[in-house]
Image: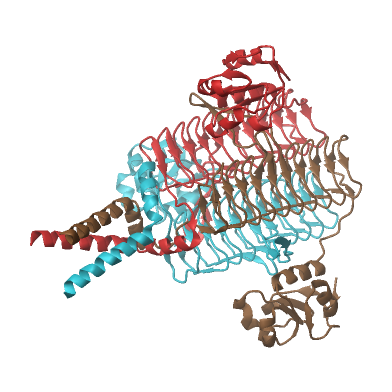
Chain colours: A brown, B red, C cyan
Amino acid sequence: MSYTLGELAERLGAELHGDADCRIERVATLHNAVPGSISFLSNRRYQGFLASTGASAVILSAEFLSDCAVHALVTENPYLAYARAADLLNPPPAFEAGVHDTAWVSAKAQVHPQAWIGPQASVGPGTTIGARVYLGPGCVVEAGVQIGDDSRLVANVTLCRGVRLGRRVLLHPGVVIGGDGFGIANDDGVWVKVPQLGGAEIGDDVEIGANTTIDRGALEDTVIENGVKLDNLIQIGHNVHIGEHTAIAACVAVGGSARIGKRCTIGGAASIAGHLEIADDVHLTATSAVPNSIKQPGVYSSGMPIQENRTWRKNVIRMRHLDDLARRINRIESRFRKDDEE
Amino acid sequence: MSYTLGELAERLGAELHGDADCRIERVATLHNAVPGSISFLSNRRYQGFLASTGASAVILSAEFLSDCAVHALVTENPYLAYARAADLLNPPPAFEAGVHDTAWVSAKAQVHPQAWIGPQASVGPGTTIGARVYLGPGCVVEAGVQIGDDSRLVANVTLCRGVRLGRRVLLHPGVVIGGDGFGIANDDGVWVKVPQLGGAEIGDDVEIGANTTIDRGALEDTVIENGVKLDNLIQIGHNVHIGEHTAIAACVAVGGSARIGKRCTIGGAASIAGHLEIADDVHLTATSAVPNSIKQPGVYSSGMPIQENRTWRKNVIRMRHLDDLARRINRIESRFRKDDEE
Amino acid sequence: MSYTLGELAERLGAELHGDADCRIERVATLHNAVPGSISFLSNRRYQGFLASTGASAVILSAEFLSDCAVHALVTENPYLAYARAADLLNPPPAFEAGVHDTAWVSAKAQVHPQAWIGPQASVGPGTTIGARVYLGPGCVVEAGVQIGDDSRLVANVTLCRGVRLGRRVLLHPGVVIGGDGFGIANDDGVWVKVPQLGGAEIGDDVEIGANTTIDRGALEDTVIENGVKLDNLIQIGHNVHIGEHTAIAACVAVGGSARIGKRCTIGGAASIAGHLEIADDVHLTATSAVPNSIKQPGVYSSGMPIQENRTWRKNVIRMRHLDDLARRINRIESRFRKDDEE
């Protein structure tokens, strides 16, 4: 797939500076680009490469235009325009429709004739699989699942009974949706399983990273709204509700019945307790631990960055006695106050 | 499946207040219940729904009976009684016995005639699969594995060579048991693999969540005792031993050769170092980091909850110099002592 | 497989103390060994078992020789010698070459005649699978993948399009390599996917634990160099580069474009931000959080170990006001300075 720079400018809504007929065949980083490539500058730290890039053209914001030695597409959000250009130049691989010889599809499943069921896949009864769905090798779709049009399950994905996916959902390998939530009741020291009877509903345009797990609800549904993006190895507990266009980085744990707002961003390795609410437009930096609800939009953080081990050890000992330390300061201050009164 | 309220009262050992003939067909939350449902109150925060619930009956403790506008089952542990009611009203889905056309079962495997081997499953030689075992789609059972009666492997589970499961074990999708532990020896800068020759033994009534991994032992076995409940995305290192009826929430890391007692509860995203012992009846709150043995039962915690980012940044800087701060307090106090002596 | 003690001494380069003809059939721990076993002592805490071990011989360092009641092999690195002995006595299980009846192999794949493609596996077009490769049950190999000689994919592993593995790579169940990285660009509140066009290259002698995920690069490749050892449930973001012979314990999150040096060791549950560099020979203890580059070799740490819950609660409150506390100390000190000046 290739475009002229003029065609790209038009499709991206960018301002063309240079040769409209220049042919663009691929995207590349500034420092590794060869002629025929279009590159982008969205992070000031790579500005130095502008002078020497081998790219035929660069997508950038107006402030960097004068530094650019090659053709340019000027736009306010170069990373977004780059994403669109990369998509135009690299359309997702085409696939045939049909059912692979080694796949198993229940006679009671409804598979759209334009869908593809890949090798070693398994599709249970009562499922509905939409148009242009790609069900990759080794995927397991249990009974009663619904998969919306244009969704793609890359490989070895598991959708448990009754899970519902919207349209254009992208699930990476190893994703599990609709496993039982962690519901246990204690009977005098012995745990009794609480049946997990709810479902899991995934909106349109949701992307979920490799080996991420999303539990089904206990009684009602776990809900992931439209446009949510989840990275790899994330845990979403039962009855969690995640609002539209929230993005969560890898290795985050979200406890059961947590309700996360719209347009939030959550950094890697954060952990969110169950049974709380996080408002819309909350941003959590990496490693944040959230024990209680967050009512106001804003940026929140916790965690302790590394130090040289010897220093950390000394500090940790103090941390374990911080309350004592604070009380000692109180006593010193009260002594001053006494001195002042005398 | 349906029961009269009188039948349920008897089976749950609960005290009936209301119409014994009222027919109950399903469980539901207090606020979403419709007639024919039984609901429960185990968390005081939902007390307000008692007055307006659409449920035909509610399971609750005696203290809330007077607030309840509908029939009631009174019991000391409403959540436990609810779990039992939910199980009665929602028996696990029945399945046929046999081997699916697309499954592969070694001629040297012993599969009980009442077991089910699902689509795309793979069962190696020397395995023994008990009565009423459900081996779901895509499960891999390597050579020499034993699976006890009434166990259920939902889908895409992997049991490596020689793993032994007890009875009524429930494994959610993506679980891996018996992968090699992380054993490496250093040869002048180059890592040499230490063969992992032990096994993994899982007791009766154990439940393990999606994508959780349990390594085989290095020389002896990794052991998960009866009644242990593990949530999703947990790592259990080689030679770990977990005592009966311990429950571990999601995303917990347990280092190799750790020995965890009976009836412990471990909160989400906790991490437990290797080669230590945790006594019986220890409770760790979420995000706890355990570097050393815990000898006494009790509740333990660590971790730092979020703050507004600007405040956190200031505090973190101080934390990095906490030992200096403490020394400064020491100096101030010693100055006071000098003043007092003068 | 069995060896005489003399043969083992020669192969391990160890000094023989005792009967060269003693026949050794297996390895065992000191306290559970029976005759015919060789054991080892590498951790002083097990020294007490030397006197009573049932082993026929023990691998140990010279300092413990006088305490050893049985034959001995003396070496400077007993754990390494043990690893080699265990490997000699327990060669990896042999396997036949060929393609299992239930596997699917594209007609356009090149599979070495000495390779094994196991049950329910799936091998896409354009792949190259080397000599003596073992592709276990349920593995998915997408189009264009290359797998070097003597590599072993245990089961249910997924290699996405174009991934390249070196020789003697060992991948445990549930590993996913080459899933899309987490690349998203924001368009006025809506996330737009950034196509992930790079690859993933895994060097020789790399071992990767169960359910670990390694993303493909965004534009260039994610690279894991020779001899790297990764434990279970680790996340490696897009464009990460890990240097030779680095070892990472379980549940570590590595953010995109991080560059980790050679011979590093990273403890369990650590988290490393994206777009930073970690020098060679850096050692991070468990639960370390790394927000910025580490330029100097050394040992680094962060995190807060557990305390009794009541104490921790008090300390946490103080931690949230640590900056205030520090300012109060400043004021006290400045008051002293004033007093001194007066």
Q: Quick one: which residue is furthest to the front in this view?
A: A341
Residue C163 shows up from this direction: no
x and y, in percent, of residue C116 in the image: 73, 49
In this view, the residue in front, A166 or A39, is A166
Write the residue at 52% across / 20% down: B62
Write the residue at 89% across / 45% down: A112
**Residue B43 position (above or below residue B330):** above
How many numbered discs, if any?
Answer: 0
x and y, in percent, of residue C241 in the image: 59, 66
In this view, the residue in front, B248 or B255, is B248
Q: Quadrant of the N terminus of chain A?
A: bottom right
In this view, the residue in front, A127 or B143, is A127
Q: Quick one: which residue is furthest to the right in this view?
A: A113
x and y, in percent, of residue B118 in the image: 76, 34
Q: Quick one: which residue is furthest to the left in this view?
A: B342
Q: Quadrant of the C terminus of chain A?
A: bottom left
Q: Quadrant of residue B314?
A: bottom left
Relative side of C264 to B206, left or right: left
Q: Quadrant of residue C185?
A: bottom right
Relative side of A96 to C306, left or right: right
Relative side of B30 to C292, left or right: right
In this view, the residue in front, C208 or C37, is C208
Residue C222 shows up from this direction: yes
**Residue C170 position (above or below residue A17):** above
x and y, in percent, of residue C232 in the image: 57, 50
Write the residue at 70% across / 72% down: A77
